[in-house]
Amino acid sequence: MDPLSGKPHFPPPLTPIKGERTVNPRRRLAPLQPPPSLVPLPSSLPQGLSRKCAFTSTHTLSVHILPAAFPRAASSQGAIEIAPPEKFTGPSAKEERKRWLVDTAHAMLAEKMEIESAFPDPAIGVRASDVGLWGTVLRIRRNEKATAAAGEGKKGITLVTTHPIGFHKEIWEPAFRHLIEMTESASSSIRIEEMWSLEAVNHGDAALINGVHIPKLPDRSDYGRDIANFLIYHLPDGREAFGKDLPFQLPRLAESVGAERIKNGFVDRHVVPLGHSLGGDATALCGISYPKLFPAIILLETTLFPGSNSGSKRKPAIFVSTLGRRSSWPSREEAKKALLKSPLFQAFDPEVLDIYVEHGMFRDEKTGEIHLKCNPAWEASEFAEHRTMNEGWELLPTLDENVELRWIMGGRDDASNLVGGMETARLTVWRRSKNASNVKLPGAGHLLVQEKPKDVVNAPVIRRAFTDGSLAEDVATFLTRKFGSVGSSEYHPAKL
């Protein structure tokens, strides 16, 4: 059992982990530079970017934009065009569409592998854009500065979250709400000053404002660079941020501020990233390149795996299903009804599903139809990536041992199918074995943020022992042990 939570975990290997052949990884994330120019913002911004409201009685929600990491990795030019189902007619329409999807998937895979080669074929036109993209980020901040009551020497806690393929910044809101409920209770020894949820540039509202400028076949490491770019150059100092509103566009900080953060971390806050799946891979790479930024990292169901894993062979099946998925409906009600026919979405917490329908989709003003913000082409393009996951897995042992590493994994047998199964997951969570721990959330699969964000038992948390295995519970437990007044060597559940 996991000593921290008392719940199931992956026990450490009894023998040393077998060595793997190298994939010759890029040892650090590419440097960050200010973009010479940015994609022009649309005249009418997505409705989601105007949100500003009370999130709870103690915290306020707002949404912000910032220049994304620049430059981006090189990509082939153009866009993946998906033929609509109505293009295929006649008695063999279904077979013809499936053949088209399979052919397109194979072409995407071949093109991505060519991009990653040492000398890409000039015919596919690989180049990096000289125009910067926009990033979007959701902020939830405490209305009153918690650190003032705790004393001048007490640092505030700041969480920075990232999401899986196909999702968006708002998907963390149910977990955030429950985490606030627990940590704002009278018996809690911690308070959370800020929670930030950073969107990938081809997902959510970021996808809507970047549009045709989104790389055809992106490099997953750029999401890691987006995290670093936000923390090093755009996250305001605590004295300018805690308990205060911020401008809609977060300004870039001075180079001297960024250099100091890279060297020594943050003076006035504990920054703890929570990275899930795609976002977990990005978070791990960011931590490896910029360890001083973090006293601890929480990784949730990453898709890191060794290059020798048979699952690392790029298979078209997931591309075919993603390219062919339905992406528009007459209404949000129809969208939800259709999604609930799928076992994937049936497993979601009801509040999470509602948030996905509300914030993961947008209304086309011309047709009135509801569309996914991350369209199937952009979603499928992320599945073409394998190099970054292999690189991250190989580099995990190089993560500074001063950075505490907490893994939150799905407890179901199928949770780790994307990386090759439970044995691969077990090896991954112990690959950086010092100052590391892990827990398996009972009943949760790979999408544990969507399935188990909060308590399924609606009783006050201070009146019962934690038994349900919710995500927010484990995060609160870890943060309390790490930063609470009880100290880092002892944990008392009653303190929450």
Image (cartoon, helix red, strand yellow):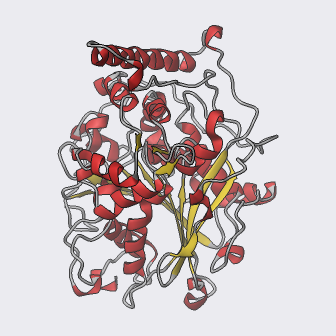
Which residue is nearer to you in this view: 253 or 346?
A: 346
Name the side, left or right, on which 489 lies relative to 142.
left
Give the percent coordinates (x, y) of residue 88.
37, 17
Residue at 75%, 43% in the rendered image:
40
Whether 70 is drawn above or below 460: the answer is: above
Number of numbered discs present? Answer: 0
| Quadrant showing the N terminus | bottom left
Whether 89 is drawn above or below 484: the answer is: above
Q: Is residue 202 visible?
A: yes
Give the percent coordinates (x, y) of residue 357.
40, 54
Name the side, left or right, on which 58 lies relative to 251.
left
Which quarter of the picture shows residue 414? Answer: top left
| Quadrant showing the C terminus | bottom left
Name the side, left or right, on which 123 lies relative to 418.
right
Name the side, left or right, on which 152 lies relative to 473.
right
Which residue is nearer to you in this view: 285 or 469?
A: 469
Residue at 59%, 48% in the rendered image:
206
Residue at 49%, 18% in the rendered image:
113
Which residue is nearer to you in this view: 447 or 283?
A: 447
Q: Is residue 262 visible?
A: no
Give the percent coordinates (x, y) of residue 93.
31, 16
Give the percent coordinates (x, y) of residue 274.
45, 57
Whether 469 is drawn above or below 451: the answer is: below
Which residue is nearer to you in this view: 63 or 281?
A: 63
Whether 108 is drawn above or below 250: the answer is: above
Residue at 70%, 58% in the rendered image:
234
